[in-house]
Every structure is written in structure tokens, then in C-alpha cells.
Image (cartoon, coloured by chain):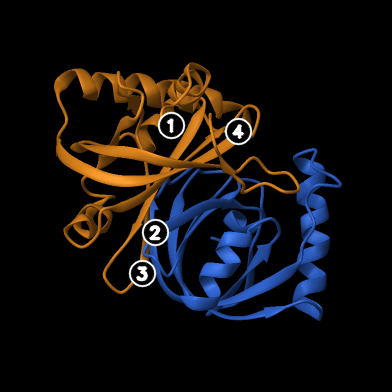
């Protein structure tokens, strides 16, 4: 599924909270916070960054499944979407990707500063290395913005 | 951990369907029932509800609003309640949360999903605000 330019702008904003999830062979789910995402130039694949320590089970699950979901939510507007698709690969992050994660997380921590914690403390708490880059093929998108009737599959985005 | 269950910062919930695809969504309430149980507010989450009926396992991440510490809870779904003291308390708390997020009229609890807490993992721990 090709992602629209508007959605690419939205998911690339530092004010977006990001989570990824998959399951093991027994269908026990796991859930991990994501440290930034980039949409590939073909607009059908994304690459997101997960802490090796926090994502241990999540990353191990890819030996058993290729199905995964990614949730993004704007902390400013609550606009939210869930991407569902297939795992393609994982590899260690490059230095430019680590720099990208720092910028994403600094922006995210600034966006949530209004909740009452300084951006410096939030960054120190949440920023983690090493991380891996997970590549995903996006096949379906569901709206998740909190409202009556949400959860519908979207034919385009 | 109790401040993380006030609903100030929404929790993130993951379940898994019969096809092995995870479903991840925000949830307004992870309500403390007792030392071994929590209740999830079932509002919009049709897919989550479908998943839990065929596969009881879930993971939820909660965040303390004053320190931003995070915990991941491994849950197993036991039953849904649409009345009784837990449901009534959750309905009242959800109205307060809706007011906080300016979502009055949108947040409405359909049922309380009672879950056993199988495991708790601290993800990020801050010593002070």
C-alpha cells in the first residue's frame, strides 16, 4: 500500500508516539516503543528503530512470524493510525540513523514537556542504544483516532 | 505504579488474532482491581475484543505521569463485566479522563475487561520528576 505524502509528513513528525507489536508461535503478543521511523522512497516500506534491550522478545519473535503492526499517534492532535504488514529484515543502525533517532527523541520529549517532565530528563530516560533498524512492508492501514466508529480499514491514506 | 493507572497518559495495548497478526491500540484505562488483577476499559476496541475472546494473552504498557517511568504488564483475559462496582468505578474515572482530554461524549465504557496480571516488567525507571 502506498502511503500518501500527508501521512509521511505525519508519521515523520517528532510529536508522533510510535509503538510496534508482533506475536510468538503461541500467539502471545509483545509490544515495544519505537525510536523513530522513516518511510522508504517507494512509499510502501518503512524502517523503524528499536532498542536491542527493550526489543529482545519482539526481535526474537521474527524467527517465528513475519506479521507485525505499528501504531502512530500524534501527541498534539490524537490523530492515530495502525499500520499492518510484513517483516522484511533487521540490521544494526548506521551512525546517521542513530543521529536521526536522537533528533526524533529530542523533538518527542519537547512535545511532551507540557505534561510536566523536562525534555532533558525524558530524553535521558528514553534514549537507548544500541538499536536495530527493522524494515516493514505496509499492507494495510487502520484509523485509530479516538472517536466513535474508529478502527476502520482505510483504502487509501 | 498506581499513578500510571490514573489514565492521565493513555496506555498502549497489544493483542493477537487467530491469524497471528498483532493489534496495537491506545486504551484510556488500566484500572487497578487488586494485587493480581487489572481491568481494561472496552470503548472503541472491536478488534481487541474479538482477539481476546479467541486468545486471552495481552501486553499493556503504562506510564507514570509524574516521572514518565514505564511498565509492561503481561495479562490474561478472564471475563467482561458490564455492571457492578468495578464497572461503576471505571465509568466514573473514565468521565474524569474524558474531561481531562476534552473528549466528553466520545469516551464511553462498554465493558470492563478483567485480566490477571501474569508478569510485570519495568521498562524505564526514573527516580524523580
Q: Chain of mark 4?
A: A
Q: Give me the chain that's orange.
A: A
- Mark 4–mark 1 Cα distance, whole angstroms, equals 11 Å
Q: Is residue A153 above or below residue A79?
A: below
- Mark 1–mark 3 Cα distance, whole angstroms, equals 33 Å
* Colour chosen for chain B: blue
Which of the labelled discs sits on residue A28, or is there none? Answer: 3
Q: Is residue A46 above or below residue B2?
A: above
Using the image as rendered, state which of residue A86 and residue A121 is in the foreground. Answer: A86
Q: Which residue is mark 4?
A: A116
Which of the labelled discs sits on residue B21, or is there none? Answer: 2
- Left or right of B38, for residue A110: left
Q: Is residue A150 above or below residue A2?
A: below
- How far across and down, in percent of the image, does residue A90 sit? 17, 41
- Mark 3–mark 2 Cα distance, whole angstroms, equals 10 Å
The tag earlier along the polypeptide, 3 or 4, is: 3
- Left or right of B124, for residue A89: left
Camera-near label (2 vs 1) is: 2
- Mark 3–mark 4 Cα distance, whole angstroms, equals 34 Å
Q: Are marks 4 and 1 in contact (CB under 8 Å)?
A: no
Using the image as rendered, state which of residue A128 and residue B109 is in the foreground. Answer: B109
Co-location on one chain, circles 1 and 3: yes
Q: Is residue B64 above or below residue A155?
A: below
Q: Chain of mark 2?
A: B
- Mark 4–mark 2 Cα distance, whole angstroms, equals 36 Å
Co-location on one chain, circles 3 and 2: no
Q: Chain of mark 1?
A: A
Q: Which residue is mark 1?
A: A121
- How far across and down, in percent of the image, does residue A73 sit? 54, 36
Co-location on one chain, circles 4 and 2: no
Q: Residue at x 21, y 46 (%)?
A: A52
Amino acid at each position: 500500500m502506498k502511503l500518501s505524502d500527508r501521512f509521511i509528513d505525519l508519521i515523520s513528525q517528532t510529536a508522533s508516539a510510535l509503538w510496534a507489536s508482533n506475536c510468538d508461535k503461541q500467539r502471545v503478543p509483545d509490544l515495544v516503543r519505537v525510536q523513530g521511523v522513516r518511510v522508504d522512497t517507494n512509499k510502501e516500506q518503512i524502517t523503524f528503530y528499536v532498542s536491542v534491550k527493550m526489543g529482545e522478545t519482539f526481535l526474537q519473535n521474527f524467527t517465528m512470524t513475519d506479521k507485525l503492526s505499528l501504531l502512530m499517534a500524534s501527541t498534539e492532535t490524537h490523530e492515530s493510525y495502525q499500520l499492518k504488514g510484513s517483516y522484511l529484515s533487521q540490521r544494526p543502525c548506521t551512525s546517521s540513523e542513530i543521529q536521526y533517532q536522537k533528533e526524533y527523541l529530542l523533538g518527542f520529549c519537547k512535545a511532551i514537556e507540557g505534561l510536566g517532565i523536562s525534555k532533558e530528563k525524558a530524553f535521558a530516560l528514553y534514549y537507548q542504544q544500541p538499536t536495530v533498524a527493522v524494515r516493514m512492508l505496509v499492507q494495510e492501514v487502520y484509523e485509530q483516532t479516538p472517536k466513535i466508529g474508529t478502527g476502520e480499514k482505510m483504502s487509501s491514506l | 505504579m498506581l499513578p500510571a493507572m490514573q489514565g492521565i497518559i493513555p496506555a498502549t495495548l497489544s493483542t493477537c488474532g487467530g491469524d497471528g497478526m498483532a493489534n496495537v491500540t491506545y486504551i484510556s484505562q488500566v484500572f487497578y482491581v487488586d494485587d493480581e488483577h487489572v481491568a481494561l476499559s472496552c470503548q472503541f476496541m472491536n478488534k481487541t475484543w474479538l482477539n481476546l475472546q479467541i486468545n486471552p494473552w495481552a501486553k499493556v504498557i503504562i506510564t507514570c505521569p509524574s516521572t514518565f517511568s514505564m511498565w509492561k504488564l503481561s495479562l490474561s483475559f478472564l471475563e467482561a463485566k458490564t455492571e457492578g462496582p468495578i464497572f461503576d468505578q471505571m465509568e466514573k474515572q473514565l468521565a474524569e479522563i474524558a474531561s481531562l482530554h476534552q473528549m466528553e461524549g466520545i469516551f464511553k465504557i462498554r465493558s470492563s475487561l478483567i485480566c490477571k496480571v501474569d508478569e510485570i516488567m519495568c521498562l524505564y525507571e526514573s527516580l524523580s520528576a
